[in-house]
Amino acid sequence: MPTSIVTGGAGFLGSHLCDRLLREGHRVLCVDNLDTGTLENIEHIRGEEFTFVQHDMVDHLDIRESIDYVFHLASPASPIDYLRLPLHTLKVGSYGTHNALGIAKKHRARFLLASTSEVYGDPLVHPQREDYWGNVNPIGPRGVYDEAKRYAEALTMAYHRQQGVDTHIVRIFNTYGPRMRPFDGRAIPTFLRQALADKPITVFGDGSQTRSFCYVDDLIEGFLRLIDSDEHGPVNIGNPGEFTILQLADAVIAATGSASKVVYEALPQDDPTVRQPDITRARQLLGWEPTVELDDGLQRTIASLRR
Ligand code: NAD
Ligand code: UDP
């Protein structure tokens, strides 16, 4: 039975990854400091194949049993979280990634870094291909997250090139689904919470900025294909279906049958104007592409919110 570590395993994506790995017959060590994750996300998991370890990845972690896979997801991910935890975000991206890579090196495990489309910043190339170096403001408020992830990518490539660790980097584009926290500040859970309560939908700016939303199950499938592949360079995993935030608000209103109206609020500093993955590499290298359209994914997310 392969053994996997999932750092950030009590978070939104991490808990779905734990579920999937257990279904695939892995033993799973879920490591999380519960900064933005919760035990509720993993309370349905039972059995001796699953162990929860409360630990801050910024600190060294000694694992005695043999490990086959390290999935490194630990990091605040929502803008309101990393703006609230700027130093912690930089530390988990640097020291935390260093520790996770150290575990992979010691155990000769395959390693996957959960990177982000934020490494492209406010992109001047559209859609974004992996060979685009990005347009990030290093000293703006979002810089703590964007630069932590860029550093984590550099560290990962150094461990691969110099230390021979079997590393993989996934650049995740906006992903949504069940278990997102209603108050995590990201657009889809916020709009759904507002729509289900018939409250105003808070669109930032004029709503013309775009995002491309991937359903969580599609993303996790991409993780598993990538970590078992021979590809060491970054691979975008996201759904190329691109929507303005105003279109997203309309889709949420339609999906919930809500009486909510849109209200406009100030656009946060450095909010990227466009974002859409070019997934040619994922298609060619992994045979991966998304299968869940936005309307379907919203319905699944709504059903879980209602439950
Ligand atoms: P999340 O906040 O739900 O999960 C992050 C988890 O990491 C939480 O459980 C949190 O408690 C844990 N964590 C944070 N700091 C830690 C530390 N120092 N030590 C141990 N655990 C720590 O966010 P998410 O959406 O599930 O994101 C997971 C990963 O995916 C993050 O690395 C994020 O940057 C990346 N990502 C997510 C998206 C997305 O759309 N969801 C997009 C791009 C990248
Ligand atoms: N957004 C919005 N209203 C909200 C929350 C977010 O208009 O209540 C916008 C936000 O400004 C951004 C987009 O939705 O343009 C996606 O925001 P999110 O926080 O989900 O992700 P990110 O900015 O990291 O892509």
Image (spheres, grey):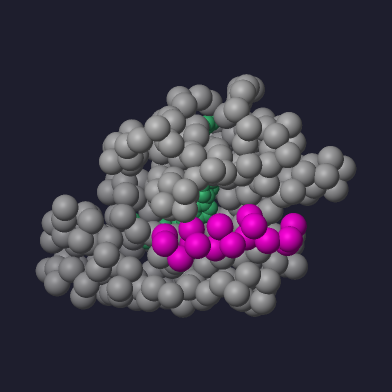
Q: In this view, does 262 lie to the left or right of 97?
A: left
Residue ID at (38%, 76%): 293
- Can residue 85 be found in the magenta stretch? no
**Residue 55 in the image, given as x and y percentages of width and height:** 50, 24
Outermost right residue: 162
Residue ID at (73%, 39%): 108
The span picked out in magenta is 216-232
Residue 157 seen: yes
The dominant secondary structure in magenta is helix
- Can residue 224 be found in the magenta stretch? yes
Q: Quadrant of the N terminus?
A: top right
Q: In this view, does 63 lie to the left or right of 84?
A: right
Q: Is residue 27 left or right of residue 231?
A: left
Up-down: is 243 above or below 142?
Answer: below
Residue ID at (64%, 57%): 228
Q: Quadrant of residue 286?
A: bottom right
Up-down: is 266 above or below 93?
Answer: below
Residue 126 seen: no
